[in-house]
């Protein structure tokens, strides 16, 4: 019997969990030929999410939970879940019912057809602000232009991954994780399904503007050095213009002498150049910052508890090769 893990990262979601299970149970009831494991990851919630998870686990042993030692962010919470997932396939979804559980049977069908990564593309997004929709739209297009790999637009983390893809993702231990890009990076057979993204069932988005902005920068810097190249191009362009201007100034001085003037143009040039230099420094800084984080080699997350057991030692830090890794 094949096992399917449903992996759900949760941050301050005490009110979402019940609604989520209500919908999910209806779907899982019709998946008789599979063993299912629901793996809830508590990403350092400050409300009663952990207590709620413990209660759900006590009631139903097919519900597992993993509690991180603090809030590590959704990307790391997903990695933790992938490390601990037992399934032959893992389905990643949000707890707020923005990803409809009703799509699960269709995903499993495509997986049985031989696809390793069945991802869901949003046909529409409901209940999200105009700003979020437009910025997401342009960001994905920008990323596609820049990134070395093809990252599909309007695709989130909602997907089914075969064990092969899961282990591949677990082997990528980079610190500034941009999972959406990693899904593309690992390759394997991909299949797209369409769905309508619903408004959040309850509560507010846990992804603040600052978190999303950081994630957006991570997306570009982890898959592309295009901004660095842009800096060189900008430098080249400005020096060429400056050279032409130099010829003009020298010519003018030779022909007409040099009445001391040009304060406004000088100030404009100094300010303009200063601005450009700061921007370019900032771009370099983004990459240096990433080297800084990688070089420290800290783990991506720490686990405090797994199904009521305190986790110490190696499993806390490194993912473990499971039986699935045995040669075929
Ligand atoms: N989440 C998380 N850690 C965080 C932020 C969010 O595990 O630091 C979870 C959250 O509980 C939810 C999912 O990630 O299950 C998506 O978050 P949210 O719905 O707030 O983001 P949005 O859908 O607005 O992008
Ligand atoms: Mg959401």
Image: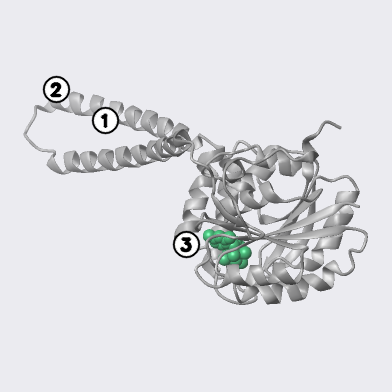
| Marks 1, 3: nearer the viewer | 3
Counting residues from the start of the chain, the first of labels 2 and 3 encountered is 3
Horizontal side of residue 207 vs 185, given as left or right: left
Circles 1, 2 touching at the beta carbon (< 8 Å)? no
**Location of residue 224 in the rendering, given as x and y in whole percent from the top left corner:** 54, 37
**Location of residue 89 in the rendering, given as x and y in whole percent from the top left corner:** 80, 50
| Marks 1, 2: nearer the viewer | 1
Residue 308: quarter of image = bottom right
The answer to whether 210 is drawn above or below residue 128 in the figure is above
Residue 278: quarter of image = top left
Q: Quadrant of the C terminus?
A: top right
**Location of residue 250 in the rendering, given as x and y in whole percent from the top left corner:** 18, 24
Q: How far apart are marks 2 and 3 (CA)?
A: 56 Å
Nearer to us in this view, 32 or 225: 32
Q: How far apart are marks 1 and 3 (CA)?
A: 42 Å
Q: Name the residue under label 3.
A: 209
Q: Which residue is drawn at 52% across and 66% down?
A: 131
Quarter of image, ligand 2: bottom right
Secondary structure under badge 1?
A: helix
Specify whether residue 18 is in view: yes
The answer to whether 83 is drawn above or below residue 159 in the figure is above
Residue 7: quarter of image = bottom right
The answer to whether 196 is drawn above or below residue 83 in the figure is below
Q: Mark 1 points at which residue?
A: 245
Nearer to us in this view, 99 or 134: 99
Counting residues from the start of the chain, the first of labels 1 and 3 encountered is 3
Q: Name the residue under label 2.
A: 254
Mark 3 neighbour class, 10 Å CA radius: few under 14, some 14 to 19, many 20 or more: few
Secondary structure under badge 2?
A: helix
Secondary structure under badge 3?
A: helix
């Amino acid at each position: 019997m094949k096992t399917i893990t449903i992996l759900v990262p949760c941050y301050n979601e005490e009110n979402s969990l019940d609604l989520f299970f209500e919908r999910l149970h209806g779907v899982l009831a019709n998946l008789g030929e599979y063993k299912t494991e629901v793996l809830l990851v508590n990403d350092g919630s400050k409300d009663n999410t952990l207590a709620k998870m413990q209660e759900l686990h006590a009631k139903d042993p097919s519900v597992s939970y993993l509690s991180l030692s603090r809030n590590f962010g959704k990307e790391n919470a997903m990695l933790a879940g992938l490390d601990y997932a037992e399934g032959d396939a893992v389905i990643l979804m949000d707890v707020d019912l923005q990803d409809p559980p009703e799509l699960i049977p269709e995903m499993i069908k495509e997986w049985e057809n031989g696809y390793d990564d069945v991802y869901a593309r949003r046909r529409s997004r409901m209940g999200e602000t105009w700003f979020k929709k437009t910025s997401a739209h342009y960001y994905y297009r920008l990323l596609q232009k820049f990134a070395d790999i093809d990252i599909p637009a309007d695709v989130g983390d909602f997907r089914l991954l075969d064990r092969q893809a899961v282990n591949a993702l677990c082997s990528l231990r980079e610190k500034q994780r941009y999972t959406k890009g990693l899904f593309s990076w690992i390759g394997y057979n991909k299949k797209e399904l369409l769905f309508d993204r619903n408004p959040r069932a309850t509560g507010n988005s846990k992804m603040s503007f600052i978190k999303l902005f950081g994630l957006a920068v991570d997306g570009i810097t982890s898959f592309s050095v295009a901004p660095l190249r842009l800096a060189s191009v900008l430098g080249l362009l400005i020096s060429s213009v400056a050279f032409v201007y130099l010829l003009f100034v020298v010519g003018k001085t030779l022909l007409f002498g040099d009445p001391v003037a040009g304060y406004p143009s000088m100030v404009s040039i100094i300010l303009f150049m200063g601005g450009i230099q700061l921007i370019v420094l900032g771009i370099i800084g983004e990459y240096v910052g990433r080297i800084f984080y990688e070089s420290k080699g800290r783990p991506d997350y720490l686990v405090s508890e797994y199904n009521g057991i305190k986790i110490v030692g190696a499993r806390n830090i490194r993912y473990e090769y499971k039986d699935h890794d045995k040669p075929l």
